[in-house]
Amino acid sequence: MSTTLSPAALQGMTLAEVVAENVRAYAGRRRLTRSELARMIGMNNTAAGSRWRGEIEWRLSELPGVANALCVTINDLMTPPRGVELRPPTGLEPATSGLEGPCSIH
């Protein structure tokens, strides 16, 4: 998929950003507006608009309908553009202590 990405996007995108970008790009290729996509997947315009703009993440349960409406696979929606690395979302740093369990290797 060839889309014009901002310099910030080339530094890495979260999976949520990738999905939102891909939904917009594939919809554009099919000449579908946000409203048309919303109608096709049974979502109201407000909810679809928030997801379209990346303000709210697309739910995993919504992706099959979106992929079907856009005639792509879920994998297509989740694949970063060429040359873009996935980065983890901020604010979800892993815990590093207290994770020892019965199977821990010391």
Image (tube, rainbow, N blue to C red):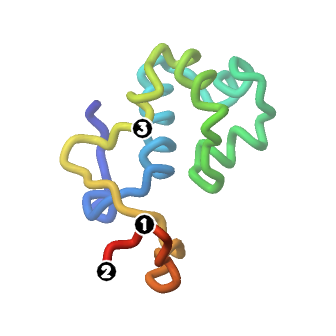
Amino acid under disc 2: His
Q: Quadrant of the C terminus?
A: bottom left
Amino acid under disc 3: Met
Q: Is residue 99 above or below residue 72?
A: below
The residue labelled by disc 3 is: 78
Q: Is residue 73 above or below residue 4?
A: above
Q: Which mark is residue 106?
A: 2
Residue in the foreground of this view, choosing between 99 and 21: 99
Q: Earlier in the sequence, mark 3 or mark 2?
A: 3
Instruction: Provide residue 63's location: percent of width, then percent of height.
Output: 58, 30
The residue labelled by disc 1 is: 103
Q: For the residue carrying disc 1, how many other residues have a C-alpha within 10 Å: few (<14), some (14-19), or many (20+)?
A: few
Q: CA distance from mark 2 to mark 1?
A: 9 Å
Q: CA distance from mark 3 to mark 2?
A: 37 Å
Amino acid under disc 1: Cys
SS for tag 3? helix
Residue in the foreground of this view, choosing between 9 and 32: 9
Viewer-nearest of labels 3 and 2?
2
The residue under the point 50% across, 50% down is 16
Q: In the visual, does 41 lie left or right of 5?
A: right
SS for tag 1? loop
Q: Quadrant of the N terminus?
A: top left
The residue under the point 64% across, 41% down is 59
Q: For the residue carrying disc 3, how many other residues have a C-alpha within 10 Å: few (<14), some (14-19), or many (20+)?
A: some
The residue under the point 33% across, 73% down is 105
